[in-house]
Amino acid sequence: ALRELSHKVPSQHELDRQERFEAELLKVRIDIFERLRRVGIHVVFAVNLVMMQQLLVNPSLSSAMALLAPLVEYGLHTVLQAGFVKIQALSHFRIMQSLLVGSYAVWTYGVVSKETDLHAITAMEKLAAAGLVVQSVAFIDWKVPIPTYILGATAVTLKQWQIGGPVTPMMVLSSVLSHVLLAGM
């Protein structure tokens, strides 16, 4: 019985090794996030300009919702870049993940609820797909990007079908295949 117990309790060496691994993993996560943030701030700025223009042309609650998420993300990027807030612990990293995934959901709702142009919806879908790739790299261990993307892609695809008129089997097949292939990346 004593021998079985000794196998279940990790040694101090194993605990130290696990702690070093977690510290190194956090360092890599922060480095990846910083690299993505440096590029993301420019993308989010461009999205903000487009969403502001749409709010001015078509002032509505859904237009405001579509603008809210990129504004929050741009604010986060700016605060991080200025050094007012620093990601130094795993809890800080998780909070940032939650805020970014939440803003993605709000943005998707705003776009899907207000957009009536098929080309704009298609462009937003491609932007959402690019967002998935960024989320997958930054949040690889969180298991949230794929379900989030699936829900967003489903909403955007249904909106495309609603705007596009009659749904053909080829439309369904091409939409499903493109989303499955992208999610498999």
Image (spheres, rainbow, N blue to C red):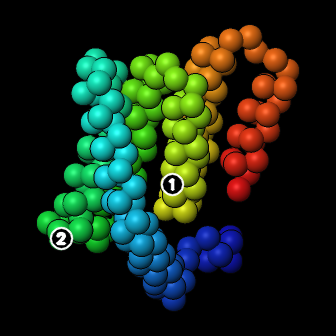
Where residue 83 is drawn, which disc sits there? 2
Left or right of 137: which side holds 28? left
Q: Examine the image and state in which quarter residue 123 appears.
A: top right
Where residue 169 is drawn, which disc sits there? none
The quadrant of the image that shows the C terminus is bottom right
Q: Examine the image and state in which quarter residue 8 appears.
A: bottom right
Residue at the spot x=51%, y=37% of the render? 124
Residue 116 point in image, percent of width and height: 49, 19
The residue under label 1 is 135
Residue at the spot x=43%, y=40% of the render? 104
The quadrant of the image that shows the N terminus is bottom right
User: Is any part of residue 162 visible from this angle?
Assistant: yes
Q: Examine the image and state in which quarter residue 37 appears.
A: bottom left
| Secondary structure category for the residue under label 1 | helix
Three-letter amino acid code at the position of disc 1: Gln
| Secondary structure category for the residue under label 2 | loop
**Residue extending farthest bottom:** 13
Residue 184 point in image, percent of width and height: 73, 51
